[in-house]
Image (cartoon, rainbow, N blue to C red):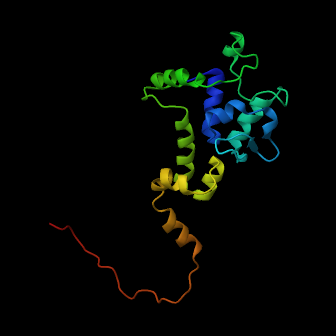
């Protein structure tokens, strides 16, 4: 429900889990197509990180960085450039708000902020059973506490599934000798 350069920015948010400001500052040289990563040099935590991309994410960044200078912005706001509000065409603070509102209205959704794209990314990973440490790394958290607090409830079977998959069969318990009851006919 959004188009053009804003659509690219939204897709970038959904495919990386990066914050709006992180994407707005991203340069073509920050994308490494060989390793399939983007380098977030300046984050909220002050620590840089590498975000690993899916094949779809790599395809997006291949397209967005093609024919651009290495120091050029990945995500450009041409409307700003045309209005000479910023020579670089960079997305600025609050530029996304009105566009997100319009996209949500067009889709029949309640207003969501750009940050909800980050939550969506993390939720998808957690729901697919990705270890919380990996999710924390992708989001730039130093440990899993924030991920556990905000997303841990999405995978209540995570611990059980992990233990059952990792623990070997020891062969120390005999198979049960009890037959399950079979009820014939209809119960009335």
Is residue 74 something that shows in the picture?
Answer: yes
> Residue 18 is drawn in which quadrant?
top right
> Residue 153 is drawn in which quadrant?
bottom left
Where residue 34 appears, x then y in whole percent? 82, 45
Establish if 167 lies above or below 177: above
Where residue 144 appears, x then y in whole percent? 57, 57
Establish if 173 lies above or below 76: below
Q: Give the residue displayed 45% in from the left and 22% down from the top.
A: 105
Q: Nearer the viewer, residue 36 or 92?
A: 92
Quick check: 47 left or right of 143? right
Picture quarter with the C terminus:
bottom left
Where residue 162 appears, x then y in whole percent? 55, 67
Q: Give the residue displayed 80% in from the left and 41% down from the top.
A: 33
- Furthest-top residue in this view: 83
Q: Give the residue displayed 43% in from the left and 29% down from the top.
A: 109
Is residue 1 something that shows in the picture?
Answer: no
């Amino acid at each position: 429900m959004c188009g053009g350069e804003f659509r690219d920015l939204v897709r970038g948010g959904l495919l990386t889990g990066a914050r709006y400001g992180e994407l707005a500052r991203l340069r073509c040289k920050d994308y490494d197509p060989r390793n399939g990563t983007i380098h977030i040099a300046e984050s909220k935590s002050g620590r840089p990180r590498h975000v690993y991309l899916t094949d779809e994410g790599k395809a997006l960044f291949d397209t967005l960085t093609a024919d651009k200078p290495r120091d050029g912005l990945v995500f450009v706001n041409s409307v700003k450039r045309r209005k000479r509000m910023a020579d670089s065409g960079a997305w600025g603070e609050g530029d996304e708000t009105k566009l997100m509102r319009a996209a949500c209205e067009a889709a029949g959704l309640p207003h969501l902020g750009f940050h909800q794209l980050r939550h969506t990314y993390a939720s998808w990973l957690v729901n697919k059973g990705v270890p919380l440490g990996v999710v924390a790394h992708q989001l730039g958290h130093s440990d899993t506490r924030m991920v556990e607090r905000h997303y841990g409830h999405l995978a209540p079977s995570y611990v059980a599934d992990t233990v059952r998959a990792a623990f070997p069969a020891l062969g120390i318990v005999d198979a049960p000798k009890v037959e399950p009851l079979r009820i014939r006919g209809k119960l009335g």
